[in-house]
Image: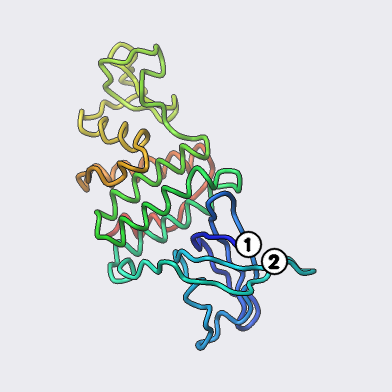
């Protein structure tokens, strides 16, 4: 079998082998890569984390095994920037935690665009926030940002409620349950959940708002989805 994809997890197996998880354009793939952890392995670069490669595998009694691979993009510049590298780890973790094989075709273009953006020097935390929203959308946990989730009104939006699943208008605002947001923050929230892949790099966001939203989304997935993200701790410290 031959396919193209992005490496999202590498797990050492035995002394020099590794189990490799790849997000492909239409599904998730997992295979054993014999000997890739040897210092002189010719295929090592193709299975590095967050590399995009073309793989050839064959099926045996113990599952799929890597036969050959061609590195298409190593995203080398990401490794030279601490924040970009922390974001790449975050992208990998949320992809592994949320994305099922059936979701691959929907999220693959965004992961490819996110890595391209990081490699080209686009603001790393903006990348992290947009991709986080895209993953939540694909996994079925995205916020509704077109209208008030209480009454359906499309104007006078003043808050976001993670519990209610989206925007809240002035008339439905409850000071005991909701916290009003700035107009800028509301625009950022709407953008990250609505933007398509072609406009991924249209704008960068102010870091304080990005950090605030990353914390809020992290709390949301921890409280509601029961998933605890480890890589976000380092990301928020940078």
Compare residues 60 and 235 and report the one nearer the observer. Answer: 60
> How many discs mark residues in the rendered view?
2
Report the disc number at residue 64: 2
Residue placed furthest toward the right: 61
Q: CA distance from mark 1 to mark 2?
A: 7 Å
Label 1: which residue?
A: 30
Residue pictured at 22% horizontal, 48% vertical: 207
Query: Badge 1 local density, few (<14 within 10 Å), some, or many (20+)?
Result: some
Residue pictured at 50% horizontal, 42% vertical: 106
137 above or below 131?
A: above
On the image, which quarter does residue 213 sit in? Answer: top left
Residue pictured at 50% horizontal, 63% vertical: 7
Image location (x, y in percent) of residue 123: 24, 54
Residue placed furthest toward the bottom: 40
The C terminus lies in quadrant: bottom left
223 above or below 44?
A: above
């Amino acid at each position: 079998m031959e396919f193209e994809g992005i490496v999202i997890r590498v797990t050492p197996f035995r002394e020099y082998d590794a189990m490799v998880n790849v997000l492909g354009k239409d599904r998730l793939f997992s295979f054993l890569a014999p000997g890739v952890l040897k210092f002189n392995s010719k295929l090592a670069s193709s299975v590095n984390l967050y590399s995009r490669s073309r793989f050839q595998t064959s099926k045996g009694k113990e599952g799929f095994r890597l036969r050959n691979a061609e590195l298409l993009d190593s995203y080398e510049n990401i490794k030279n920037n601490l924040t970009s590298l922390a974001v790449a780890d975050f992208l990998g973790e949320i992809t592994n935690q949320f994305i099922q094989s059936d979701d691959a075709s929907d999220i693959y273009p965004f992961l490819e665009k996110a890595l391209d953006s990081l490699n080209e020097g686009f603001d790393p935390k903006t990348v992290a926030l947009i991709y986080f929203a895209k993953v939540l959308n694909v996994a079925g946990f995205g916020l509704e940002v077109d209208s008030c989730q209480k009454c359906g009104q499309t104007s006078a939006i003043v808050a976001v409620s993670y519990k209610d699943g989206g925007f809240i208008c002035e008339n439905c605002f409850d000071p005991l349950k909701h916290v009003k947001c700035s107009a800028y923050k509301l625009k950022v929230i709407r953008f990250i959940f609505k933007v398509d892949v072609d406009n991924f790099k249209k704008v960068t966001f102010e870091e304080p708002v990005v950090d605030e939203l990353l914390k809020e989304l992290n709390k949301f997935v921890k409280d509601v989805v029961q998933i605890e993200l480890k890589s976000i701790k380092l990301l928020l410290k940078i």
